């Protein structure tokens, strides 16, 4: 007898439906075809043990399982549940009241018949609704994640026996329903940290506000313990809130990577990722034999913080150059190519030298001649070229730390950032792919970042006296445009330019002596 149902395979951040067919006929053996990987092939043993634990038996006949289309590679253990249900129906051990072909079924089986959570549930649920299926049967621990998608029955089950009883009509399982908008808006601003917790560092807070308002990348240079990591961790709290569409995009990526956690649902706050400097190239940008999203994609619509930037492998940093420009990463293999979104803000920090105390107001640097410059040279020029703000962080004095003065909250700063972003949204309404000042190409910089004669003279003088490089020119104009937006000014004034010029520390000649 032939039994059929549907599962799904995830490629990139999208899902493709897979037809699962089982035939039980004369002969012996269990045959699994359709380009399965090792985890799928091992499902025979998990399915057999689960059937016995649930009071059924594996047919002592020839069982052929086909995963179609047969030329697409299948991976993972999520096909256990649909295979088990089809084996039971094909061997006539169960008679289903509900049609298996009306549902997408996914789940990994334990040996005792319980279901384990799987990855990529959200894109599968989206594809199942798009293809018009009645419902999606999956492990209970993933049900809240899938319930983000409406207009499809999300049936969460804890055991294989529970799934059998549902299809036989012996057990009525109510579909899980989530009010996505209510969930989203109730958790929109649930951050554990706030800028009001930071004493002092007003100049760095100002730089962070400018970065958030214009979508600019930032590098902070300062000694250990100056507060670089603490400030970076609070940047997401002043970024504009996620839209519902951005939240769904972000949740899809984390779902595919298996980073959502059990019983998690919609991500409603901007992600903050801080990988260690020993990270590999593939873990940072994505990849592997079966491509998975990397840290830059997990930071999509949020912040990627690279602490101690010169300590990262140069190859890992260089592969970020293209994603920083294109806001996406493409990973190609012989048989297919996948694309992951990677629209993130890069926040980097570094010590000014190996000992950490170059230019320190109190402690003396012990690095030898040329050591500081060699240390800075670990970060390539092309990567620095994609960072708009270079900020020097100095240690907070004891008096500032113990002053207990009320500091400005993240909410107050965020309101100014949102107003500036609204101005930019209107400005770039006709420019596809440009949403904030940091994304402006050179031709737009010339038409939008117009400065008067006095501003032109100031910029010329600054470039000559400070020895600023040519690449600093466009960056200064972009940042000054953002500062003007924060001030509510339609034109770039001389004070806006002056403030922008001070955020190009690493472009100054002889900065490292």
Image (tube, rainbow, N blue to C red):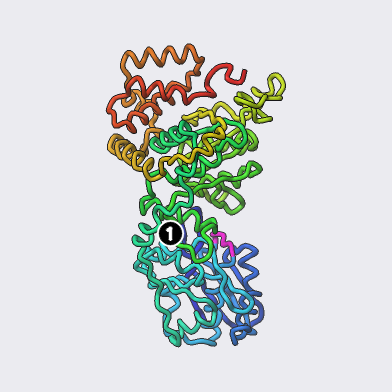
296 left or right of 445? right
Write down the quadrant of residue 41 in the picture: bottom right
Residue 343 seen in this snapshot: no
Provide the secondary structure element on which disc 1 rests. loop
Q: Which residue appears at 38% of the width and 45% of the height?
A: 411
Q: Which x, y percent locates residue 351?
A: 62, 31
Write down the quadrant of residue 456 in the picture: top left
Quadrant housing the C terminus: top right
Query: Residue beneath label 1, please?
Result: 266
Q: Which residue appears at 33% of the width and 37% of the height?
A: 420
Q: Is residue 182 magenta?
A: no
Q: How many marks?
A: 1
Seen in the picture, residue 401 relative to 126 is either above or below; the reply is: above
Q: Is residue 75 magenta?
A: yes
* Residue in front for this viewpoint, 213 or 400: 400
Q: Magenta part mainly helix, strand or loop?
A: loop
Q: Which x, y percent locates residue 160?
A: 54, 79
Seen in the picture, residue 475 relative to 34 is either above or below; the reply is: above
391 left or right of 186? right
Q: Which residue appears at 48% of the width and 53% of the height?
A: 253
* Residue in front for this viewpoint, 231 or 136: 231
* Other residues around mark 1 within 10 Å, as few (<14) / some (14–19) / many (≥20): many
* Residue in front for this viewpoint, 337 or 492: 492
Q: Which x, y percent locates residue 436?
A: 37, 36
Seen in the picture, residue 127 relative to 318 is either above or below; the reply is: below
Q: Which residue appears at 40% of the width and 57% of the height?
A: 187
Residue 404 seen in this snapshot: yes
364 left or right of 488? right
Q: Which residues are magenta?
A: 71-76
């Amino acid at each position: 007898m032939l039994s059929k149902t549907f599962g799904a395979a995830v490629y990139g951040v999208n899902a493709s439906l897979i037809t699962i067919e089982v035939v039980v006929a004369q002969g012996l053996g269990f045959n699994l075809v359709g380009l399965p990987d090792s985890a799928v092939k091992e499902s025979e043993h998990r399915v057999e043990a689960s059937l016995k634990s649930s009071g059924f038996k594996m047919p002592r006949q020839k069982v052929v399982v086909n995963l179609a289309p047969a030329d697409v590679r299948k991976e993972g253990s999520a096909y256990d549940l649909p295979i088990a249900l089809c084996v039971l129906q094909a061997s006539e051990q169960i008679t289903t009241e509900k049609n298996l072909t009306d549902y997408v079924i996914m789940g990994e089986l334990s040996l005792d018949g319980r279901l384990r959570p799987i990855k990529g549930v959200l894109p599968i649920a989206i594809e199942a609704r798009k293809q018009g299926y009645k419902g999606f049967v999956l492990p209970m621990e993933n049900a809240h994640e899938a319930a983000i998608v409406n207009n499809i029955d999300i049936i969460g089950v804890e055991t294989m026996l529970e799934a059998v009883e549902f299809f036989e009509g012996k057990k009525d399982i109510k579909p899980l329903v989530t009010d996505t908008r209510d969930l989203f808006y109730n958790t929109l601003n649930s951050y554990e940290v706030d800028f009001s917790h930071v004493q002092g560092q007003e100049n760095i807070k100002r730089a962070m506000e400018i970065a958030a308002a214009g979508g600019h990348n930032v590098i902070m240079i300062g000694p250990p313990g100056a507060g670089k990591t603490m400030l970076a961790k609070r940047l997401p709290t002043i970024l504009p809130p996620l839209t519902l569409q951005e939240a769904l995009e972000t949740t899809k990526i984390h779902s595919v990577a298996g980073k959502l956690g059990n019983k998690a649902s919609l991500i409603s706050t901007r992600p903050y990722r801080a990988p260690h400097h020993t990270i590999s190239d593939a873990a940072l940008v994505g990849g592997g034999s079966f491509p998975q999203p990397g840290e830059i994609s997990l930071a999509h619509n949020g912040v990627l913080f690279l602490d101690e930037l010169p300590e990262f492998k140069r190859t890992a940093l260089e592969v970020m150059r293209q994603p920083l420009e294109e806001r996406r990463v493409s990973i190609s293999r012989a048989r297919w190519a996948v694309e992951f979104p990677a629209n993130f803000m890069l926040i980097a920090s570094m010590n000014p030298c190996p000992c950490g105390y170059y230019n320190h107001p109190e402690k003396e640097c012990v690095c030898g001649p040329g050591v500081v410059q060699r240390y800075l040279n670990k970060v390539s020029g092309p990567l620095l070229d994609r960072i708009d703000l270079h900020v020097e962080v100095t240690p907070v004095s004891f008096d500032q730390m113990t002053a207990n003065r009320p500091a400005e909250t993240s909410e107050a700063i965020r309101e100014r950032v949102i107003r500036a972003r609204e101005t930019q949204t209107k400005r770039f309404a006709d420019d596809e792919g440009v949403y904030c000042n940091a994304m402006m190409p050179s031709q737009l910089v010339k038409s939008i970042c117009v400065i008067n004669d006095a501003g032109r003279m100031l910029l010329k003088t600054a470039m000559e006296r400070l020895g600023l490089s040519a690449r600093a020119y466009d960056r200064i104009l972009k940042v000054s445009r953002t500062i003007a937006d924060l001030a509510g000014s339609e034109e770039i004034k001389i004070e806006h330019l002056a403030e922008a010029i001070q955020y190009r520390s690493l472009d100054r000649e002889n900065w490292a002596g």
